[in-house]
């Protein structure tokens, strides 16, 4: 901007010529206009346009520098700075500032040092004590802290936290909490108070709501012949079972075997007997196969209520009766997973 353009921009609203002009020995020129407006022109040290300062009777002061920067000071002390690139900064008396960028981004800094950035797409970023809090238009929120902690809250309510030591915690909306420890151990906490701990060596520990632990060792994998899917196999440590528990478990295993046999094996046919010679004798009717033992009737109510009403042993048996394979039932690491399997099958 030429010096003539600068003067025109700053003094366009002034009427008439200056009533008084003062030329100082330092090169500054002071012009006094009707109404009390004063314009001071400063010389430039590099040959370009110098700074011009306009002082209005109401106390407003406007300064235009040779590089195109404009600074306005209001009577209450508020300052407005406009840079050549279009960035506008307002500084208030209380120390807070507001910056507006040409792309629409607005940055506000409070007197407490907290800064908030609002972008044109609606994204907001708050910076406080070194921590950053991002909020996106879809509802996703991100937090990052100077000590390395991070937290992500998704729009569906799922929360994922990471810690400097590598620990991770995921909180799902269904109430299940997954924790991954730095040594590779994972812990699943269920809404009913039960927990499942998975170790890096493949072994697991089921912990009931009352704190009792059941150790389970990973023994391998196999393919389910019905579904073609891979099934993980575990071996339960029965040392923690009472004698009655072991008896119930043995009875359950026998019942399950009988149920599977009745489903998968056709009943044997009784061969027909030959008639004696010479007098024909009516052929005896084939003996009817013994009916397979019928599983106990499921408790009445919804599928969820049925699952809750079964004992642990009866629940496993009910899952097989409802259509689950033996490996599928055995793969459930605790009552909570058995209940979910029973519910998914629709009950009996």
Image: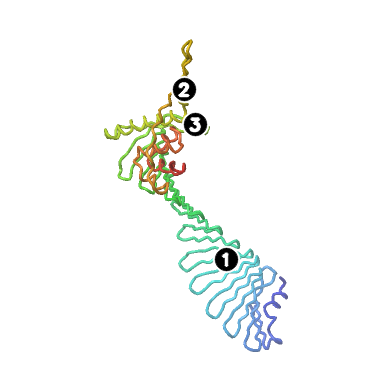
Q: Which residue is mark 1?
A: 106
Residue furthest out toward the left: 243
For the N terminus, the quadrant is bottom right
Mark 3 to mark 2: distance in Å?
A: 29 Å
Would residue 274 appear left or right of 256 to someone viewing this image? right
Query: Closest to the observer: 188 or 16?
Result: 188
* Label pair 1/3, CB-CB below 8 angstroms: no
- The image position of residue 348, as x and y in percent, is 43, 41
Q: Which residue is mark 2?
A: 269
Looking at the image, which is closer to me, 178 or 248?
248
**Quarter of the image where one finds residue 201:** top left
Front residue of this view, candidates 251 and 189: 251
Q: Between marks 2 and 1, how big is the CA–CA gap?
A: 86 Å
> Circle 3 is placed at which residue position?
224
Q: Earlier in the sequence, mark 3 or mark 2?
A: 3
Q: Nearer the viewer, mark 1 or mark 3?
A: 3
Q: Residues within 10 Å of mark 1 (few under 14, many from 20)?
A: some
Above or below, 132 relative to 182: below
Q: How far from the left and from the top, in percent, is residue 212? A: 30, 41
**Marked residue nearer the N-terminal end (1 or 3):** 1
Secondary structure type for disc 1? strand
Residues at circles 2 and 1 in contact by the CB criterion of under 8 Å: no
**Image position of 90 with respect to 122: above or below:** below
Which tag is nearer the camera, tag 3 or tag 2?
2
Q: Position of residue 140 (x, y in %)?
A: 52, 56
Q: Position of residue 254 (x, y in %)?
A: 36, 29
The label number, if any, that marks residue 78 in the structure image: none
Residue neighbourhood size for the residue with mark 3, other residues' Cα within 10 Å, grouped as few (<14), some (14–19), many (≥20): some
Q: CA distance from mark 1 to mark 3?
A: 59 Å
């Amino acid at each position: 901007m030429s010096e003539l353009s600068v003067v025109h921009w700053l003094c366009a609203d002034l009427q008439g010529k200056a009533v008084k002009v003062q030329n100082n020995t330092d090169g500054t020129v002071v012009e006094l206009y009707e109404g009390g407006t004063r314009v001071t022109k400063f010389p430039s040290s590099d040959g370009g346009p110098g700074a011009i300062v306009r002082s209005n009777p109401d106390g407003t002061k406007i300064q235009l520098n040779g590089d195109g920067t404009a600074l306005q000071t209001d009577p209450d002390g508020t300052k407005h700075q406009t840079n050549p690139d279009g960035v506008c900064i307002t500084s208030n008396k209380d120390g807070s500032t507001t910056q507006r960028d040409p792309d629409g981004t607005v940055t506000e800094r409070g007197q407490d040092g907290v800064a908030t950035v609002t972008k044109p797409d609606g994204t907001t970023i708050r910076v406080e004590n070194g921590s950053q809090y991002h909020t996106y238009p879809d509802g996703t929120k991100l937090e990052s802290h100077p000590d390395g902690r991070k937290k992500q809250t998704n729009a569906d309510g799922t929360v994922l936290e990471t810690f400097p030591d590598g620990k991770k915690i995921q909180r799902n909306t269904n109430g299940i909490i997954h924790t991954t420890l730095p040594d590779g151990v994972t812990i699943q906490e269920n809404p009913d108070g039960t927990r499942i701990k998975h170790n890096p060596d493949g072994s697991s520990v089921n912990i009931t709501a009352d704190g009792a632990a059941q150790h389970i060792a990973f023994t391998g994998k196999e393919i389910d012949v019905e579904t073609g899917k891979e099934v993980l196999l575990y071996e339960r440590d029965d040392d923690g079972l009472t004698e009655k528990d072991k008896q119930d478990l043995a009875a359950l295993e026998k019942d399950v075997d009988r149920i599977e046999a009745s489903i998968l094996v056709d009943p044997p046919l009784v061969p027909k007997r030959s008639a004696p010679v010479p007098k024909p004798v009516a052929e005896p009717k084939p003996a009817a196969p013994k009916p397979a033992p019928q599983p106990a009737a499921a408790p009445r109510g919804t599928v969820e209520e049925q699952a809750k009403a079964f004992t642990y042993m009866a629940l496993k048996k009910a899952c097989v009766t409802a259509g689950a394979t033996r490996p599928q039932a055995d793969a459930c690491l605790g009552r909570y997973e058995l209940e979910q399997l029973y519910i998914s099958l629709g009950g009996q």
